[in-house]
Image (cartoon, rainbow, N blue to C red):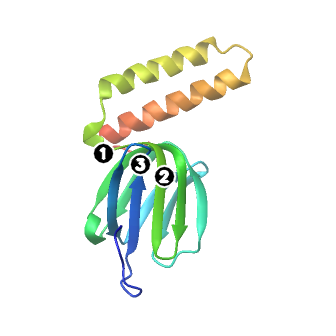
C-alpha cells in the first residue's frame, strides 16, 4: 500500500474492486461521487464513511498525478492520511466500452418506460440509467 509520512501532505489512496486493485498511490486531493453528491478529500480531513454512487473518482497530484476512474456503487473511507475506495465497479476511462454503455442506457430507459406504478422498478431503471450515463461521460472525458 502507498505509504505517506506524517508531514508529507499527501493522502495514501487505494482503489479496490472485488477483482483487482486498480490504484495504490498518493495524491494531494481526491474527488469522489457519493450518493449525496461529489465530495473532496484532502490531507488531514476528518474521518468519513460514505456510500459511493456512479461517477468519477479524480485524483490530483502526488505519485498518482492527475488521474480519473469511473466507479459505481460501493463505499469510501476517508481518514486524515488515507482514502480507501471499495467499489463494485471501477474502470479507467480507456477500459470503458461505450457501445456496451449505450446498450445499458437503452435498457435503463426501456425499464423506466415499462415500470408503470412500481416504485422499485423506477429505482432500478434510474440506477441503471445513471450508471450508463456516468460511464459514457467518463469515457468521453466529461463529467455529468
Q: Relative to 119, say whether 7 is above or below.
A: below
Whole-percent x, y for residue 103 in the image: 39, 19
Question: What is the spatial separation of the Cα atoms under label 3 and label 1, in whole angstroms?
Answer: 10 Å
Residue at image position (39%, 70%) is 12
- Which image quarter is the C terminus in? top left
Q: Nearer the viewer, mark 2 or mark 1?
A: 2
Tell me the tag on residue 86. 2
Whole-percent x, y for residue 31 in the image: 44, 59
The residue at which mark 1 appears reads as 92
Q: Nearer the viewer, mark 2 or mark 3?
A: 2
Residue at image position (33%, 62%) is 24
- Which image quarter is the N terminus in? bottom left
Question: What is the spatial separation of the Cα atoms under label 2 and label 3, in whole angstroms?
Answer: 14 Å
> Within 10 Å of the Cα at label 3, are there few (<14), some (14-19), or many (20+) other Cα atoms?
many
Please report whichever mark, 2 or 3, sits nearer to the chain's N-terminal start. Answer: 3
Tell me the tag on residue 56. 3
Q: Does the residue at mark 2 contact the one at mark 1 (Cβ under 8 Å)?
A: no
- State the image quarter where residue 11 is shown: bottom left
Please report whichever mark, 3 or 1, sits nearer to the chain's N-terminal start. Answer: 3
Question: What is the spatial separation of the Cα atoms under label 2 and label 1, in whole angstroms?
Answer: 15 Å
Please report whichever mark, 2 or 1, sits nearer to the chain's N-terminal start. Answer: 2
Q: Secondary structure at mark 3?
A: strand
Residue at image position (60%, 56%) is 50
Q: Secondary structure at mark 1?
A: loop
> Within 10 Å of the Cα at label 1, are there few (<14), some (14-19), or many (20+) other Cα atoms?
some
Amino acid at each position: 500500500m502507498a505509504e505517506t509520512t506524517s508531514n508529507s501532505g499527501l493522502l495514501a489512496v487505494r482503489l479496490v474492486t472485488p477483482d483487482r486493485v486498480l490504484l495504490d498511490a498518493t495524491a494531494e486531493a481526491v474527488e469522489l461521487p457519493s450518493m449525496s453528491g461529489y465530495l473532496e478529500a484532502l490531507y488531514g480531513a476528518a474521518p468519513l464513511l460514505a456510500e459511493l454512487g456512479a461517477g468519477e473518482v479524480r485524483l490530483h497530484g502526488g505519485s498518482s498525478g492527475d488521474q480519473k476512474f469511473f466507479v459505481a456503487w460501493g463505499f469510501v473511507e476517508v481518514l486524515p492520511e488515507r482514502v480507501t475506495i471499495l467499489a463494485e465497479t471501477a474502470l479507467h476511462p480507456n477500459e470503458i466500452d461505450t457501445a456496451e454503455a449505450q446498450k445499458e442506457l437503452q435498457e435503463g430507459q426501456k425499464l423506466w418506460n415499462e415500470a408503470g406504478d412500481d416504485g422499485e422498478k423506477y429505482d432500478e431503471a434510474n440506477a441503471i440509467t445513471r450508471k450508463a450515463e456516468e460511464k459514457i461521460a467518463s469515457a468521453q472525458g466529461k463529467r455529468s
